[in-house]
Image (cartoon, rainbow, N blue to C red):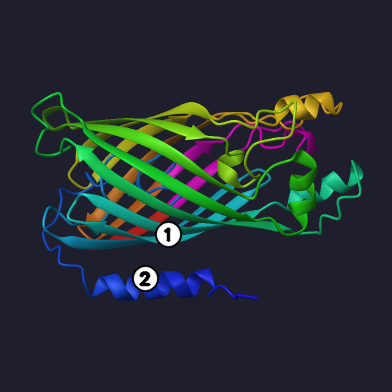
C-alpha cells in the first residue's frame, strides 16, 4: 500500500519551498489580487476571479497562504492552503477543507448507514489557473477584462458517510473546469467578476460528484458573480452569488424524501481589509441555503465566514 504524506506536511513543504523563490516586493495594488477562495484559488471567498494569486507581477514569483473558518446554524467548515503565482500568468494552489457534518448522524434513522457521531468530511483541492488575455490593472482604462481558465480537482474523504455517498451513487473525486473574467474600473473603484463553472459537484464536492438516476449525473454550466467596491486602498466591500447544480433532489424525491436533498445557491456579503501589502482579512455574512434540509428541519444555513491570508 502506498501511503500519502499528510496534507499539512505537503502544505508546509510547499510553503517552505516557494517562499525561498518569492521575489515580489512592491507587487500588485492592494486587494486587486483578490483573497483566497474556499478552494484555494485567488478571488472572492466563494468564487475564483481571473486574477493570479500572491503579490507577484510580471517576471516575478510569489506565494500566498490562507486559513479560513465558516459556521452556520448546523455546520462548520475549516480550511487552509497555499498558492504559487508564476509571472502573473499561472497559479497553482493546494487546499484542504474539513467539514463538520455532525447532523448526518440523523441519516441512520432513514437506513442503517452506520454514520458515526461527530463525523467530518475532508476534501483536498488541487487548482490550476492560467491567465489567457487582458490585465485587470493595466487595462483598467479600457473595457477589456482579464480572462483566465482554470480547473479544480477535488478528492473527498467522507469517512463513515461514504455509505451514504454509495447509496446516492456519487463519486468521491471530480474536476471542475471554469473560465473567469475580471474587470477593474479603477476610476470608479469597482471590481466586477463573472465565472462560468462546468461541474457536477454536490455542495462544492463535499457530498461527492454526480448522482444515481433520476438525479443529475452529468456536468452542467453554473454561473458565479462577484462585485467589490474599493472604499480606499486598504478596504473593500462586496457581494457574491454562486449558482449550484442541485443534482440530488430528484433522486431524493423518487425515494420518497421530497426536497430533503435539495441544494440551494450560495451568496455572501463581505468586507476585505489589507492592513499591509502582505496581509489581508476577510469577514463575510454567508447564506448557503438549505444543505440536506431533510436532517436540519429545512433550516437555511446562514452564518459567518472569516479568512486570513498572507502573500509575498
The reply to whether discs 1 and 2 touch (Cβ–Cβ < 8 Å) is yes
In the picture as drawn, the residue positioned furthest to the front comes out as 1
Establish if 8 lies above or below 179: below
Q: Which residues are magenta?
A: 284-306
Viewer-side residue, 293 vs 21: 21
The picture quadrant where one finds residue 121 is bottom right
Mark 2 — residue?
Answer: 14
Q: Residues within 10 Å of mark 1 (few under 14, many from 20)?
A: many
Left or right: 269 with respect to 129?
Answer: right
Which residue sits at x=81%, y=51%? 105
Residue 115, given in percent of the width and then of the height, sits at: 82, 55
Determine if the magenta segment contains residue 271: no
Residue 245 x/y as whole percent: 58, 29
The magenta stretch spans residue 299 = yes
Residue at x 45% of width, y 50% of height: 39
Task: Answer with mark 1 or mark 2, whichever residue precedes in sequence.
Answer: 2
Q: Secondary structure at mark 1?
A: strand
Report which residue position mark 1 lands on.
Answer: 94
In this picture, is 169 found above or below 189? below
Residue pictured at 56% horizontal, 72% vertical: 4
Residue toward you, 55 or 75: 55
Quadrant of residue 126 within the rendered picture: bottom left
Amino acid at each position: 500500500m502506498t501511503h500519502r504524506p499528510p496534507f499539512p506536511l505537503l502544505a508546509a513543504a510547499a510553503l517552505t519551498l516557494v517562499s525561498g523563490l518569492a521575489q515580489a516586493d512592491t507587487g500588485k495594488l492592494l486587494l486587486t489580487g483578490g483573497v483566497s477562495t474556499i478552494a484555494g484559488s485567488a478571488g472572492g471567498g466563494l468564487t475564483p476571479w481571473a486574477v493570479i494569486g500572491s503579490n507577484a507581477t510580471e517576471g516575478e514569483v510569489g506565494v500566498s497562504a490562507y486559513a479560513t473558518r465558516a459556521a452556520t446554524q448546523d455546520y462548520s467548515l475549516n480550511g487552509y492552503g497555499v498558492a504559487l503565482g508564476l509571472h502573473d500568468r499561472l497559479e497553482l494552489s493546494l487546499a484542504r477543507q474539513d467539514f463538520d457534518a455532525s447532523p448526518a448522524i440523523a441519516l441512520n434513522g432513514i437506513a442503517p448507514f452506520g454514520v458515526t457521531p461527530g463525523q467530518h468530511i475532508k476534501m483536498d483541492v488541487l487548482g490550476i489557473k492560467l491567465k489567457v488575455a487582458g490585465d485587470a490593472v493595466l487595462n483598467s482604462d479600457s473595457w477589456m477584462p482579464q480572462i483566465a481558465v482554470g480547473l479544480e480537482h477535488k478528492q473527498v474523504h467522507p469517512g463513515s458517510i461514504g455509505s451514504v455517498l454509495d447509496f446516492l451513487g456519487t463519486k468521491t473525486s471530480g474536476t471542475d473546469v471554469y473560465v473567469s473574467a475580471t474587470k477593474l474600473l479603477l476610476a470608479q473603484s469597482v471590481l466586477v467578476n463573472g465565472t462560468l463553472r462546468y461541474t457536477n459537484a454536490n455542495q462544492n464536492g463535499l457530498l461527492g460528484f454526480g448522482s444515481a438516476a433520476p438525479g443529475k449525473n452529468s456536468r452542467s454550466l453554473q454561473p458565479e458573480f462577484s462585485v467589490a467596491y474599493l472604499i480606499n486602498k486598504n478596504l473593500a466591500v462586496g457581494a457574491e452569488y454562486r449558482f449550484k447544480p442541485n443534482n440530488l433532489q430528484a433522486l431524493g424525491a423518487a425515494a420518497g424524501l421530497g426536497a430533503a436533498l435539495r441544494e440551494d445557491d450560495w451568496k455572501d456579503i463581505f468586507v476585505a481589509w489589507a492592513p499591509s501589502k502582505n496581509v489581508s482579512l476577510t469577514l463575510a455574512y454567508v447564506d448557503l441555503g438549505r444543505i440536506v434540509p431533510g436532517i436540519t428541519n429545512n433550516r437555511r444555513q446562514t452564518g459567518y465566514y472569516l479568512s486570513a491570508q498572507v502573500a509575498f
